[in-house]
Image (cartoon, rainbow, N blue to C red):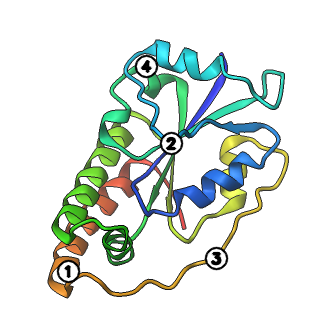
Amino acid sequence: MKKILLLVSHFCSGSDILYNSLNNNPRIQGYKRLEPNFYTSGLDFLYLTNCKHKLNNTSAIFMDEILLNSAISSKDCYNYCKFIYIIRKPEETLNLLVKKNYKPNYAQRYYLYRLRRICEISKRANGLLLVYPNFNSELIQEYLKLKEPIKLDSKVEKIDNLVSSKLIEETEDAYEKYFSFLKRYINYAI
């Protein structure tokens, strides 16, 4: 069976930094496209693993980044994939989403809806939880059984405050509940 890694996250989480760093590893090939991949059956995973990989042996890992709730609707993935869950705190995420032209209320709804979906997936598929910007490269390397070290870009950008403090406070309360849930179900890394 070919190895599949799914980075399960939300927009503006910093998952792109991890994706790019892992994609530089000789064993990992990422297949993130402009349009997201949707995994609705085992055939979609077969399509992913039939793509050309930079490594031509059984240690090759096929990787994708999942940022939308509808991207995983196949129960097959829970059995065949490794998962790394990446989340970011609400204040930073909401401000970045608003900076990208999301309306504040829509940004909050997307973020919380996505966190809930990440919790649903984590109940069925154990993995590794990372909170941006604290990516532990040694733990990731151990989880994926990589021989080569992972070189992570640790640059954290300055974020302007574009969202009301009331909206951030509401979102932080919900985030704490989801975060507590995630820590119970999956391996946690700081």
Q: Which mark is residue 34?
A: 2
Callout 1 environment at 10 Å: few (<14), some (14 to 19), or many (20+)? few
Mark sitting earlier along the chain (2/1): 2
Nearest to viewer (mark 2 / mark 1): 2
- Give the residue type at disc 3: Lys
Are the residues flagged by discs 4 and 1 in contact, CB closer than 8 Å? no
Callout 2 amino acid: Leu
Which residue is farthest top? 43
* Nearer to us: label 3 or label 4: 3
Depth check, mark 3 against mark 1: the one in front is: 3
Q: Nearer the viewer, residue 135 or 14?
A: 14
For label 3, the residue is 155
- 3D distance between C-alphas at marks 3 and 2: 24 Å
Residue at the location (36% across, 74% down)? 99
Which residue in the structure is indicated by mark 1?
Answer: 169
Q: Please give the label number shown on residue 76.
A: 4
Residue drawn at (19%, 62%) of the image: 106
Quadrant that contains the C terminus: bottom right
Q: CA distance from mark 3 to mark 4?
A: 36 Å
In the rendered image, the quadrant that contains the N terminus is: top right
